[in-house]
Image (cartoon, grey):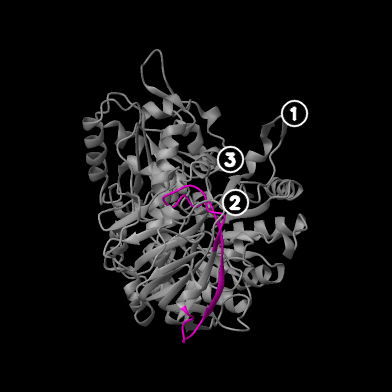
Amino acid sequence: MNELPQSKITSGTRKRVLYTNAKVWQWGEGLARTGHGATYSLTDWFAVSLEEFSGSSGSGSCTSSILQAGIAPTPAEANYDSVIDLKGALVVPGLQDAHIHVGYTGESAHYVDLSGAQSIPELWQLVQAKADSHPELSWLVGVGWDQTNFGGVYPSRSDLDTIASGNRPILLYRNCWHIGVANSAALELSGLIARDSATGEWRPCSDKFAVAGGHVDVDGDGLPSGIVRETAVELVTKHMGASSHDERLAFFSAALQRCVANGLTAVQTNDGVEGLPVYQELLAAGKLPLRVQLTIQCSDLQRSRTTATGDAPLEPLDGCDTRGMLTCKRVKIFADGSLGAETAALRVPYRGKGKEAAAAAGAAAAADNRGILVHTSEALTAQVKLAKERRFRLEVHAIGDRAAEQVLDAFRAAALSEADRPILTHCQILGPDLVERMARSHVVANIQPSFVPTDGRFVRERLEDAVAASSYCWKDMMRAGVMCAGGSDAPVEHCSPLHGMHDAIYREARPEKGDQSQIAAAATRLTFAEALWLYTKGAAFADGTEAVSGAIAAGARADFTVLKAEVLEDPRRLLDADSVREVWVAGVRRYKHSSAQEPPPVVTKVDGPSAPGKNGMTRVPDSDNNGGSGVGALPQVRVRRCRCCTGDASAGELQTTTK
């Protein structure tokens, strides 16, 4: 291999690099806008122009672009500064995740993993072990339980009070992070219960139970059961300590390395405005290994930024540097909860066990449980209008069809147009009328294909048959003209885009998931090309960068993912441990699988625990072994709403950056 050592590329140089002996993915001519029926061809080589490098050891301080791609004969190598033989690998446009929580992915690795608990006593044991081994922790926090594993029974405050925690507060998130269960010590801190001075018994502080966009469940005695839903979770979490800046740097760095090792070249991440200084510091230090589009909360728009002349409103950042490595131009709004937690807002009430569980938990209107709308229609419309006035694009979380309808109404009331390119995230439960409205209104669907195998265990328990029939309808959406982008929602699901592609193609249970035939019909499955579209052209469209990313074409950014060629012939190989061979961002190799002969100049390997999936039961794909990273032991810090996906870093090599 005649590869130019990256450490020798210095400021002001311009290089032309030729990549040969490859199967280079090319999107077909006249391709449908939505990706339905996507066509492609394969070429043999492509060339990249690299300019304005600075630093050493792959700091990534450069601009780069694709020059051209073509079929044999290969151009004369003498016309290029370096030639790289890709040994017959499949080269696809840089894979992107259109919806992820990078900070939470790194942060939540340090909490009790409850995904393996098949009963409430097993849940106790896991938390008790953490309490015994970490007496220094002021809070005990866990994540991953699923009442489906407990026969539909929710854990309670009294269950947690049996744990010998030394009177420490305990909060255990369900695996969707939309609800949690707290012990008495945590509820007392939250002001939801108090000791009666005369009897010493707990008494309810019922004046605190009413929570806009949330719910505090009560038991038969009128006391909080321990279950807090949606915004009510914040009554507890606001009493936790916040993580330090250094801890956040460690969390974000570990998660970003994990993303790169799984083939990602760009993430559209929901980290809030607090994530901006972390990413800016990583960028300035040359330690941002992939492109980041930071999405902040709509509530962040009420804050201001400090300038040389005083305070000013937050404004979109459409590129914090000339390379487009960091942008912040989108805000996020929650419209409802999750299907697994029975808080997704439905037009038809939950069925069967969904109703029974809600009634047992004391949830409001349990006999007619239709989930939770986080905002009134007026409040939601006001937030959408505010975001538009401040020139931010919109991304709104909506899982249930009632929430989706409310969001589409708000988009219309705020007069959002095709140019605004609003995003509806998750889109799990829709009717044909909503799909048609999305297409007509040019609303982008940000979908998570891996929700199909995980949610399938309980879809029939939650949804009426007619509703389930039009749920998770990715193929129908694409056919109707809805632009779809693919995301993982990590750490709710695994951050691997190959994992997401596999689930879009096969829509089937893995052995640990049981039968999910109700939402796995063959007619709903995507082709390989359509699945790839989600994580390339579709994701780029959601980010507004489709002119420069999502394709290996002249003028596009030099971001590409190198996969082993076998995945194209047999997409089940997407889950192989060595499917991701190399990852290149801005013309710099950021990851190379350890089976390759030439390691990157700088290597970081950090081991971490495996991670469960969105709705319980551990999902550890083979690709966990391809080079992810975790972080070492750090003090416990505040967590919020997402699942962690860290894994074994033993098989891959990550190119980090130095000054």
Numbered mark located on residue 273 in the image: 3
Which mark sits nearer the N-terminus, 2 or 1?
1
Q: Quadrant of the N terminus?
A: bottom left
Q: Quadrant of the C terminus?
A: top left
Which residue has dot 1 on it? Answer: 309
Up-down relation of residue 50 to residue 233 (above or below): below
Q: Is residue 137 left or right of residue 253?
A: left
> Label 3 sits on what residue type?
Val
Q: Quadrant of residue 243?
A: top left
Q: Residue at x 69, y 50 (%)?
A: 392
Which residue has dot 2 on it? Answer: 335
Q: Nearer the viewer, mark 2 or mark 3?
A: 3
Q: Marks 2 and 3, Cα distance to the nearest angstrom?
A: 20 Å
Along the viewing direction, whichever of 221 and 107 lies nearer the viewer: 107
> Label 1 sits on what residue type?
Thr
Up-down relation of residue 38 to residue 307 (above or below): below
Q: Residue at x 62, y 52 (%)?
A: 322
Q: Is residue 493 visible?
A: no
> Label 2 sits on what residue type?
Ala
Q: Report crowding for label 3: few under 14, some 14 to 19, many 20 or more residues within 10 A (C-alpha).
A: many
Q: Residue at x 23, y 43 (%)?
A: 121
Q: Marks 3 and 1, Cα distance to the nearest angstrom?
A: 21 Å
**Residues in magenta?**
50-76
Q: Marks 2 and 1, Cα distance to the nearest angstrom?
A: 36 Å
Q: Secondary structure at mark 1?
A: loop
Q: Is residue 110 left or right of residue 449?
A: left
Q: Secondary structure at mark 2?
A: loop
Q: Report crowding for label 2: few under 14, some 14 to 19, many 20 or more residues within 10 A (C-alpha).
A: many
